Amino acid sequence: MISSTLGFSLVVSVIIVLIMYFIDKDKYKDKTEKQHLNDKIIMFIVIFSVVCITKACINHESIIGDSKPIVQAIKSSDQCPF
């Protein structure tokens, strides 16, 4: 799960949002719980997107998981692709 881009992004996003939730818990006492939850959901979406795109760009892999490029898969097999 951690080796795929989506799994890594999910784990990192959850950890960061939980840390921010516990740090800012006292700060949001005068706001309603719904506003506080909406702020954290928006923060989660932004962090998830940034980490997912960054990891995909750095590792040059597909977003869903580890996959071989088609050219490499054709070169590694001895059979005709047709």
Image: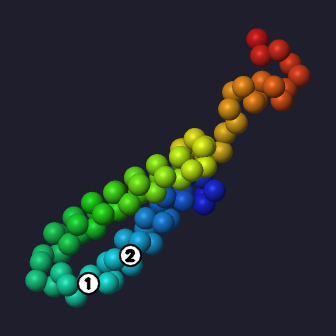
Please state the horizontal and vertical placement of residue 13, each as a whole percent of the image: 43, 64
Secondary structure of the residue carrying tag 2 is helix
Q: How is the image coloured?
A: rainbow
> Is the C terminus in the top left, top right, bottom left or bottom right quadrant?
top right
> In the rendered image of this protein, does residue 39 appear above or below residue 23?
above
Instruction: Classify residue 39 as left or right of residue 7.
Output: left
Please state the horizontal and vertical placement of residue 72, each as a whole percent of the image: 75, 30
Q: Residue at x 50, y 65 (%)?
A: 11
Please state the horizontal and vertical placement of residue 61, each as a whole percent of the image: 60, 43
Q: Residue at x 38, y 75 (%)?
A: 18
Please state the horizontal and vertical placement of residue 65, each as a whole percent of the image: 61, 46
Residue identified by numbered label 1 = 25
User: Mark 1 and mark 2: span between their CA atoms?
Assistant: 10 Å
Q: Residue furthest front?
A: 58
Q: Residues within 10 Å of mark 1 (few under 14, many from 20)?
A: few
Q: Residue at x 47, y 60 (%)?
A: 10
Instruction: Classify residue 6 as left or right of residue 19.
Output: right
Residue identified by numbered label 2 = 18
Where on the picture, by quarter, is residue 68? top right
**Dot 1 amino acid type:** Lys
Secondary structure of the residue carrying tag 1 is loop
Q: Residue furthest top?
A: 82
Instruction: Classify residue 44 as left or right of residue 53.
Output: left
* 1 or 2: tag closer to the N-terminus: 2
> In the rendered image of this protein, does residue 70 appear above or below residue 11?
above
In this figure, what is the number of numbered marks? 2
Do the numbered discs 1 and 2 sit on residues whose CB atoms are within 8 Å?
A: no
**Dot 2 amino acid type:** Leu
